[in-house]
Amino acid sequence: SFFQSSSARMIPGLELLMQTLRTYFAVDNAYVKTKMLKILIPFRSKHWKRQQSDPSTSYNNNDLTAMDFCLPLVDENAPDLYLPSMSLITYVLLCALCYGNAGQFSPEVLPDVTSKCIFTQLLEVLCIRFGFYMMQASVKMLDLWSFTGYKYLGLCCNMLVGVCLSALHLGHRGYYLTFTYTACACSYFMLKTMANNIPLVTAATGPKREVMVVAFAASQFATMWFVSQTKFL
């Protein structure tokens, strides 16, 4: 393939980038189904710790980025970028459908909704990364992009319910009722995920680990509300 050829090596960093991204898209149908259920119904899950490809590796150094973890194909707790990407695309299309049903669709709707979501998520990732920095804990940026991107699945459910009930003039009510549940579910998912991805020992001079975990979880509720498109429901 192109990325395995000598031509790809002529572009600095391209080969490494594709090798890195490949691990985040190593998914199958079983993983996607399991992950969707875990995001939407996280309260029933008991196992949240990621699997190591080499169980003999120790956590004593508190550097989780140095660990070799299993791919999403074999570990439901592994972060991926497939589900966030597909969920974002679906959410944008559902927003366009909502605008279309109200007779307000224009081509600008697609880039406007997309840019708002991506910009909001980027700010969220940077804030969380700064929180990790203050705790002197390591984390991969793509992991954060994955964790914060799972909210789009909940947003898809909200918009789908809102669009379906808009014909009965119950779009807003249906959307926010669904939003209450999905926002709580995504926040709980982030709470458990971060609790198992932040080292138990952090900087003594930094913010408390428990406070940051709760703050990261609460950010899901806030950002889901901010990027909601309910004007024409």
Image (tube, rainbow, N blue to C red):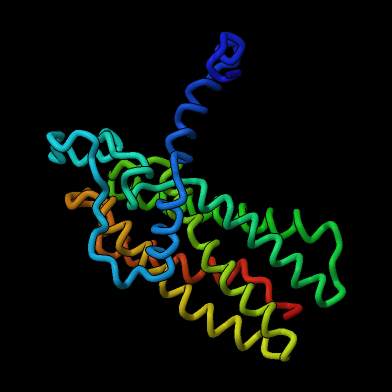
Up/down of 115 relative to 139, above or below: below
At a point 29% along the width and 71% down the height, the residue shown is 44
Image coordinates for residue 72, horizontal then vertical, percent: 38, 44
Provide residue 23's location: percent of width, then percent of height.
42, 35
- Which residue shows up at 51% across the image and 52% down it? 83
> Do we see residue 218 in this rendering?
no
Residue at the limit of the structure toward the top, as seen here: 6
The one nearer the camera, 195 or 155, is 155
In which image quadrant can residue 159 be found? bottom right
Count of marks overlaid on the render: 0
Residue nearer the viewer, 133 or 191: 191
- Indicate whether 228 appears above or below 30: below
121 sits left or right of 130 in the view: right
Q: Is residue 216 visible?
A: yes
- Residue found 62% across the figure and 66% down from its top: 227
User: Horizontally, is 106 left or right of 151 in the view?
Assistant: right
Q: In which quarter of the image is the N terminus?
A: top right
* Quadrant of the snapshot with the C terminus: bottom right
Residue 8 in picture, x, y percent from top left? 58, 15
Extreme-front residue of the structure: 30
Q: Residue at x 39, y 61 (%)?
A: 216
The x, y position of residue 188, in whole percent, is 36, 69
